[in-house]
Image: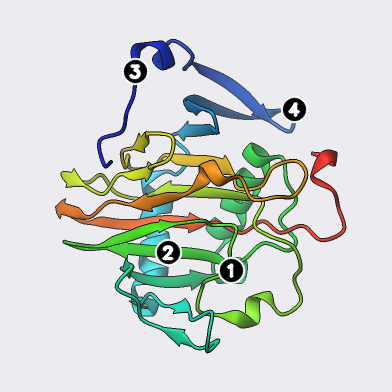
Amino acid sequence: MCYGLQTPQRERKLVCRYRTGRGNPLMVFKEEVEWDEPMILRYHDFLSEGEIDTIKTLARPKLSRAKVIDPVSGRTVSAASRVSKSAWLSEDEDPVISQLNQRIAGVSGLELETAEELQIANYGIGGQYEPHYDSKVLHEDVNLFKCLRGGRIATVLIYMSDVEIGGATVFPDVGAALQPKRGTAVLWFNLLRNGNEDARTLHAACPVLVGSKWGKLNISAIYFGPRSLSDL
């Protein structure tokens, strides 16, 4: 599962291109199609080295064992399915966060007024996250969601480190495997146009075997309420 199931036939559908964010000629992205069904896109040079250093500096003192919400008790608990540390960052902590959110809006085409704060995840040796859907609310800080309705429309993963061995983001039901590449961002949509969950987006973080997946930056919650996905 952690190596993917790429075929020559599917590779022929994959392309690299330049695209503008929301038609803004001053916001140009290097876009690579990593997978076509579901569409998974990678953006190269999405974060600079200086921005990566700033985000790590902000996150380090906040890192703690990642938790999930127990669906039965409603309490936050540690889970063997998710072995990592995480922290949350808001725009008022540094201009870098605001600039990054503007880029995320540019590649996704979505408004971020009701998005979660940025979640930073750090996977050490053996760190992993078993198969799950991002359209579910499973994170620790339930206060972030008390005024929000709907589900996570999209996920953007921004890799802040390379990994020597392991650490791929995989989609087991379709065979896609994405290797961490420092400074790149990966985008996919979790919901279909009718608002239902896209079952093909089941994904996992494979164990880190050698090295550290420092800061897979997980911005995985762009919410919608009354607005229809057909408007996208």
Residue under numbered circle 2: 120
Q: For residue 23, which numbered disc appears in the image?
A: 4
**Residue nearest the observer in this picture, 56 or 206:** 206
Q: Nearer the viewer, mark 4 or mark 1?
A: 1
Residue 79 percent location from the top left of the image: 34, 76
Element type where label 1 sits in the image: loop
Label 2, label 4: how far apart the Cα atoms are: 29 Å
Label 2, label 3: how far apart the Cα atoms are: 33 Å
Vertical position of residue 105 compared to residue 5: above or below: below
Residue under numbered circle 3: 7
User: Residue at horizontal 44%, vertical 48%?
Assistant: 158
User: Hey, which quadrant is residue 37 in on the image?
Assistant: top right
- Give the residue at the far left of this rendering: 210
Q: For residue 137, which numbered disc appears in the image?
A: 1
Residue 231 percent location from the top left of the image: 85, 40
Q: Which three-letter amino acid code belongs to the residue tagged 4? A: Gly
Asked if marks 3 and 4 touch (Cβ < 8 Å), the reply is no
Label 3 crowd bin: few (<14), some (14–19), many (20+), radius 10 Å: few
Element type where label 3 sits in the image: loop
